[in-house]
Image (tube, grey):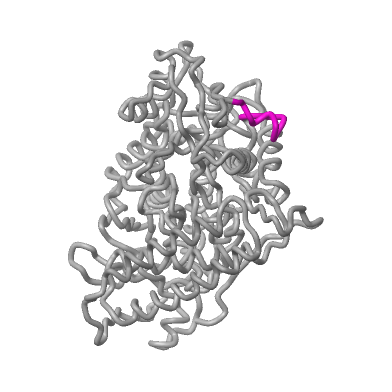
Amino acid sequence: MNFDVVVVGSGIAGLSFALKTAKLGRKVAIITKKERSDTNTNHAQGGIASVTSSADNFESHVRDTLIAGDGLCDENAVREIVRSAPAQIRDLISEGVEFTREADGSPALGREGGHSERRILHVKDYTGRAIEEALLKAVAAEKNIVVFEHHFAVDLITRSKARTLLGSESDGIAGLYVFDVKKSRVETVRARAVMLATGGTGCVYLYTTNPSIATGDGIAMAYRAGAEVANLEFIQFHPTAMYSNTGERFLISEAVRGEGAILRNANGEAFMPNYDKRADLAPRDIVARAIDSEMKRLGTPHVWLDITHKSAETLKGRFPQIWEHCIERGIDISKDYMPVVPAAHYMCGGVKTAIDGSTSLPGLYACGEVGCTGLHGANRLASNSLLEAVVVANNASKSVDEYLEKTPADHTEVPEWKDGNVRNSDERVVLQHNKGELNRTMWDYVGIVRTTKRLERALHRVENLHREIEEYYWNFRIEPDLIELRNEVLVAMLIIRSALGRKESRGLHYTLDYPNKLGEPKDTVLRREKF
């Protein structure tokens, strides 16, 4: 298969980029490992942040983002992305996204933790799903885009790899290997540029708000290919996931607190004013640590979220998805408190990129949660993620087009995938066991509050898992569970190494051994040295 550009992932980042790149006349393939709608975007409840109201302004949005990022944001990236927001909102509306409006037709703006103004555009409490549906409809109508469902990106092919095997003379992206799940075989795909839009890493943890697809595939592939990754120690734990005995963690949107919900401990006390003057609207890192502290102090498995001062009619209209989920579990949120607990939610680091999505490897781009532009710093401000995705996707479409114009086509053959003498696995229990061990290790030792001792224990265990999985990978035929676990173990190892390298507490990285900030904030950048 031969394309100008291959996009890995079909969430808001990948679809937005694909649409704009195809409209420039480029032949685009979208590779997605399950159905095209199985994405992190589909689970996004809150909304997308943008200065829309006359009561708001860019400087306020920039300031809120910088404060949440705790000194580690790239201010130039923040300003560029914030200023680009209104234009990208208009583009989404033109693609068919119908944001919720007030009776007078003006946007119904929500407020979330860390925001000093109401600036969250939303579609009730299923914004991500509404955006996903509109973009998928637009993609289906675009003749320059081909979508391959149930195709799993395995690894990038660089020209340096082709040089080793076939005699190529320049570095950069030459294509990628893709596992066709239904045919159970690996295809070799040639591409002059690859856009990683693979989402996050939540599934390396035992409890996460993310769907099962969030296995860190893009970060792992980029690192193995030699691209830089940055700030992987900054894992955002969403403060309010619904607690259940089964381990399921349904997200209770931050917008619920934005509408006045109060966190209460087991004694019914509103505890957030004891931790921050912004109380329940403090940034997520502060709220998550406060909940963790209250649970440990009182020995309880969860805290409570109280929005009983709102009527059933109001809550059904504003949060229909959350209302239905709670009713199914016997909770009427207009009368009952919701049991909530933090869960792994968002990777603030990722493949290191500029705001046009370009990486340290020519021809490789990253966009959305998989990328790290410097917008989020040490802690993402709520609803800035969908914003970053559409802005960087727009910038990247132009950047990729320029890259293809100035980069001559490389006619070097791309090496075909070879299975060699490997056989089908007769020991799949190894995958299940190692997956469970990885998730429990990350949850117990690399969570909201860390210590050097815990991190060192985690690294020792995960490095052993990495060796086992790599041996398994090279000895047996690949399959989706193996590809995902291989990526998860590598990403977990990189998260731990990044956390051990940061000798301070900043944003989402809080360690008891180094409770203070260092004077000069620096990014944690990792790059594979041997290929």
Camera-nearest residue between 466 and 458:
458
Percent position (x, y) of residue 530? 53, 82
Q: Quadrant of the rendered structure where residue 27 is?
A: bottom left
Relative placement, left or right, of 289 versus 490 is right
Relative to residue 372, is residue 489 depicted above or below?
Answer: below
Residue at 31 percent of width and 67 percent of height: 178
Camera-nearest residue between 228 and 188:
228
Name the outermost residue toward the left.
183
Name the outermost residue toward the right.
519
For the question of whether residue 344 can be seen, the reply is yes
Magenta range is: 269-280
Relative to residue 118, is residue 42 depicted above or below?
Answer: below
Relative placement, left or right, of 119 versus 311 is right
Residue at 62 percent of width and 49 percent of height: 508
For the question of whether residue 82 can be seen, the reply is no
Residue 277 lies in the magenta stretch: yes
Percent position (x, y) of residue 70? 70, 46
Residue at 28 percent of width and 43 percent of height: 141
Q: Quadrant of the rendered structure where residue 248 is?
A: top left
Relative placement, left or right, of 248 versus 234 is left
Give the quarter of the figure containing the N terminus.
bottom left
Residue 144 lies in the magenta stretch: no
Percent position (x, y) of residue 354? 60, 57
